[in-house]
Every structure is written in C-alpha cells, then in structure tokens.
Image: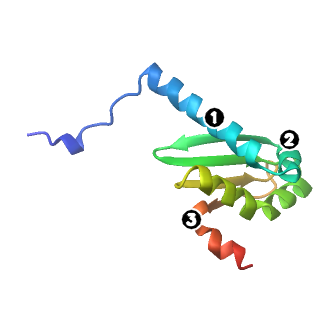
C-alpha cells in the first residue's frame, strides 16, 4: 500500500513556473521601490534577485567587490525589515565576490538579534 505522503512531489507545470517567476519579479519590484535611495544605489552596483525555495523567499545579493559587500552588510537590518513587511518567511543571502569569502545569510525573523548590535 502506498501512502500519499510518501509519493514524489508533483512535477511543476510550465504555468506554475511562469507564475512563480512573475511572483518573484513582482516582489523584487515592490522591494526595490520600498528601499531608500542609499540602498537602491547599493543594489544597482550588485547583481540581485528574488528566488523561492519551497515556501521560503530569498533575496540574493551578489556583490562585485569587498567594499560594496561591507556596505550591503551594514544595510541588512533595514533591508530585512522591508522584506519582512512583504513576505513573512524570507531570508537575505549576501554573496561576496567569488573566492573572497562565503555568503552570509539572515532570516528576516532573526532581525531582533541584529538590531541590538
């Protein structure tokens, strides 16, 4: 007897994929519009995008250099605050330049820890 919970996940249809891409694009636009000019300028120097993994939304920011990486890290709390107003289950992943460190991740529900620093 096969239990329904043990079956493989249903394959996504092309409509599912398109809807997910539209959602990610809309969240990206909404997030960017909510950012202040300083964060918008920082983001414009990076490759950044919103993606989803299961039910978790991830804001990925790929920094071109260490200075930009440091400035983005300093703006994590305000970016996380904005993101948490849009999506409750989300995290931010900040990626330094390739071969110059490992990505730093923060869940938006962890913001209180960083506000105290």
**Which of label 2 and label 1 is nearer to you?**
1
| Precedes in sequence: disc 3 or disc 2 | 2
Q: Which of 69 and 79 is in front in this view?
A: 79
| Image-quadrant location for residue 102 | bottom right
Residue bearing the label numbered 3: 109
> Where's the C terminus, which quadrant?
bottom right
**Which residue appears farthest toward the top when viewing the image?**
14
> Where's the N terminus, which quadrant?
top left
Give the spatial CA distance, label 2 vs label 1. 17 Å
Which dot marks residue 44?
A: 2
* Residue 62 horizontal/vertical position (percent): 77, 46
Could you tell whether 93 is left or right of 100 in the image? left
- Does residue 44 lie above or below 68 as drawn? above
- Does residue 102 lie above or below 41 as drawn? below
Identify the residue at image location x=79%, y=61%.
Answer: 73
- Does residue 61 lie above or below 11 as drawn? below
Q: For residue 103, say whether it is visible.
A: no
* Residue 35 horizontal/vertical position (percent): 78, 50
């Amino acid at each position: 007897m096969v239990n329904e919970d043990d079956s493989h996940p249903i394959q996504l249809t092309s409509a599912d994929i398109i809807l997910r891409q539209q959602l990610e694009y809309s969240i990206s636009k909404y997030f960017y519009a909510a950012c202040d000019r300083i964060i918008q300028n920082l983001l414009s120097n990076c490759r950044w995008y919103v993606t989803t993994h299961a039910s978790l939304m991830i804001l990925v920011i790929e920094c071109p250099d260490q200075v930009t990486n440091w400035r983005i890290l300093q703006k994590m709390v305000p970016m996380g605050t904005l993101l948490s107003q849009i999506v409750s289950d989300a995290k931010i992943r900040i990626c330094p330049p390739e071969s110059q460190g490992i990505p730093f991740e923060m869940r938006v529900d962890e913001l209180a820890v960083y506000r105290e620093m």
